[in-house]
Amino acid sequence: MKIGLLGYGKMGKVIERIAQERGHEIVARINKDDSKNDLEKSDVVIEFTAPESALENLKYCINKQIPIICGTTGWNSSIEEIYKLVSDQNAALVHASNFSLGVNLFFELNKRLAALMEPFEDYQLAVQEIHHTEKADAPSGTAITLAEGIMENTHFKGWHLGKENEKDSIGIEALREHDVKGTHLVSWNSDVDQIEIKHTAHSRDGFALGAVIAAEWLLDKKGSFTMKDVLGL
Ligand SMILES: NC(=O)C1=CN([C@@H]2O[C@H](COP(=O)(O)OP(=O)(O)OC[C@H]3O[C@@H](n4cnc5c(N)ncnc54)[C@H](OP(=O)(O)O)[C@@H]3O)[C@@H](O)[C@H]2O)C=CC1
Ligand SMILES: O=C(O)C1=N[C@H](C(=O)O)C[C@H](O)C1
């Protein structure tokens, strides 16, 4: 498969290595000020850029009907616009706040735990994410997906950035520490005990492998998908 990398930063470089190990060819490596023309040689584009760049990049690929895998976070408010464009153009998209198998399993565990905890008012929810200091957005896309999973299964109706929960809104604490690849923690605390689930990424390899698997999966499909569809969860 011919892969175009839209964003050749920390993630783009790990995706290149893993894609090549799986026998794929990288036909374009595009950064901010580069021409996008070479992307047209791609069977699929994998986009990991920056929150302010994702929307334009998505529109470019969708309008040219180049299948696209998008891992960039921080553009979720435009998701319905993008779904409509994919449908209008008969294009193909997989997007996910987190492409790793482990986090996608963690998402399911989080939803089940939230549903179990909801009747028990003695337990207070806390959500925390920790990332490297270069990260542009806060809270992380993964933490937002976790909050959405909790909202689907409890009385919570929204989320905000901050340590404390406020009435029906989940507080997401975002910490930045040197070289942390991605740590997410959901805990339910009572006066007598604590139930805690945690995912720690040891490297970026899990994110990158998931993105390449999603690209392989998307090749013969049309429509908008997430990693949940790719993994059949
Ligand atoms: N969904 C997931 O599983 C994961 C998602 N992410 C997300 O992916 C994104 C990228 O992360 P990461 O690789 O660590 O970030 P980096 O900053 O290391 O790399 C981003 C790259 O994108 C390039 N870029 C920025 N704007 C554009 C543009 N308009 N067109 C083309 N290239 C552009 C930058 O180029 P230049 O240097 O020229 O500015 C840079 O090389 C973030 O949003 C992050 O949250 C990260 C890990 C996993
Ligand atoms: O910027 C990162 O590094 C990461 N971003 C994603 C997010 O915002 O959730 C996924 C992962 O946690 C790493």
Image (cartoon, helix red, strand yellow):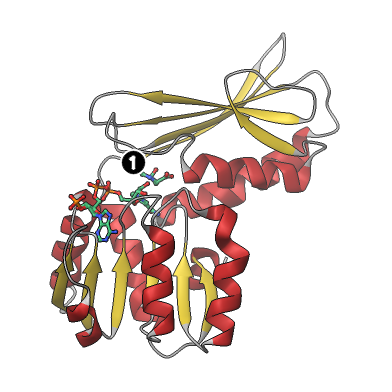
User: What amino acid does circle 1 point to?
Assistant: Ala
The reply to whether residue 12 is visible in this rendering is yes
Looking at this view, name the residue that lies furthest to the top: 191
Q: Is mark 1 within 8 Å of ligand 2?
A: yes
Q: Residue at x 30, y 69 (%)?
A: 46
- Indicate the position of residue 159 as horizontal and vertical percent values: 66, 35
Where is mark 1, residue-wise?
Answer: 201
- Indicate the position of residue 190 as horizontal and vertical percent values: 72, 15
Q: Is residue 124 above or below residue 138?
A: above
Q: Residue at x 53, y 72 (%)?
A: 225
| The quarter of the displayed image where residue 161 is located | top right
Could you tell me which quadrant the N terminus lies in?
A: bottom left
How crowded pointer 1 is (Cα within 10 Å; few <14, some 14-19, many 20+) is rated as some
Is 2 displayed left or right of 213 in the figure? left
Q: Residue at x 68, y 30 (%)?
A: 170
- Indicate the position of residue 167 as horizontal and vertical percent values: 79, 23
The reply to whether residue 232 is visible in this rendering is no
- Which residue is at the front of the view, 78 or 233? 78
